Image (spheres, rainbow, N blue to C red):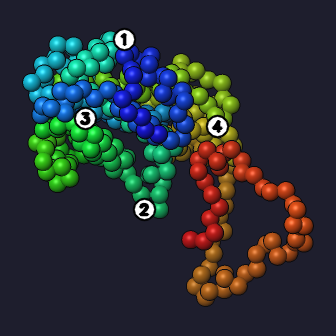
Amino acid sequence: MEEENVKISSAEDIETYFVKSDNSQNLMLFSNMPKSCFDEPCLLGVDEAGRGPVLGPMVYGICYCPLSKAEIFKEVGCADSKSLTEEKREIIFGKLCNEQESVGWAIEAISPNNICNSMFRRQKHSLNQVAQDATVKLITKAKESGINISEVYIDTVGMPEKYQEKLTAIFPEFKITVAKKADAIYPVVSAASICAKVSRDRALKIWTFQEGIEATYEDFGSGYPNDPVTKAFLAKNIDPVFGFPQLVRFSWSTAGKILQDHCALVEWEEEDDTNGSSSQTPKISSYFKQASNNKRQKTKHDFFKTRNLSTLESL
């Protein structure tokens, strides 16, 4: 889901968009795009929130403004979001939203479902690759929208030199700087970090469980794998067949161990394709009498619908 020119002036306003979105899908929001950002060369910062937790989305954010207005990020108090209290982050976020003549921002909330499915593909797509994809997508969207990007500052994913080389190849027209702890060095990256962190916190606060679980934000703990409250939440809210609710990143090792300890074991038969005999094996349905043509059509369980799963005919 993607929305542009969203009318957000405070952290509370973000909740409106998360409430009406599908938790199993990614959500991208773009603020109002100031006219000055089309007319003047701009600097743009990129950062994320929620990379490590076993619960909730990972959110990538960008923030940008004209080079001539770069001091505005210091003036509103931008700093590494992890060094600020939740209340302070939300105050600064509100100030950024209200600088509509010179500051714009965007976020992409990458759903837990999307993260795990990417990491469990037959051809694995690592968390670093998911993060890099989000960075490229947000910068590309800003560029295609007409933002006059000149300089880009990014908190690194992996080795700074290699990541900078990769992004420079994708965006040769921009001056790109990738650095460790960029959110503590460059105020524009700090601003992006605040947008990402505030968005993730608000997404978790209003999370709606499609599985019918009754739990609040306070029940989650910090969401990090070593938090006892988070571990207790995971152990309590697991189905022995269907596993975890979509809030959980089931590809994390902490979740995997709980799955092994609390869920039903499944054994998969290995087909022997060496002599081609498997193709001659009759289908199990051939042993049963066929029902009449006016039989009731089968419907999928909601578990499969919400995860966009379909029957696999062949490999």
Q: Position of residue 120 (x, y in %)?
A: 48, 54
* Tags 1 and 3 touching, CB below 8 Å: no
The CA distance from mark 2 to mark 3 is 27 Å
Residue at 53% over, 18% down = 218
Residue type (three-letter) at the residue carrying disc 3: Val
**Direction from residue 155 to residue 29 in the image, left or right:** right
Q: Which residue is mark 2?
A: 123
Tell which circle, 1 or 3, labels the residue nearer the N-terminal end: 3
- In the image, 189 versus 104, the foreground residue is 104
Residue type (three-letter) at the residue carrying disc 2: Gln
Tell which circle, 4 or 1, labels the residue nearer the N-terminal end: 1
Tell which circle, 2 or 3, labels the residue nearer the N-terminal end: 3
- In the image, 133 versus 19, the foreground residue is 19
Q: Could you say whether the residue bearing mark 3 is in a helix, strand or loop?
A: strand
The CA distance from mark 1 to mark 2 is 42 Å
**Direction from residue 117 to residue 196 in the image, left or right:** left
Q: Which residue is mark 4?
A: 238
Residue type (three-letter) at the residue carrying disc 1: Glu
Q: Could you say whether the residue bearing mark 2 is in a helix, strand or loop?
A: loop
Foreground disc of the pair 2, 4: 2
Q: Which residue is mark 1?
A: 87
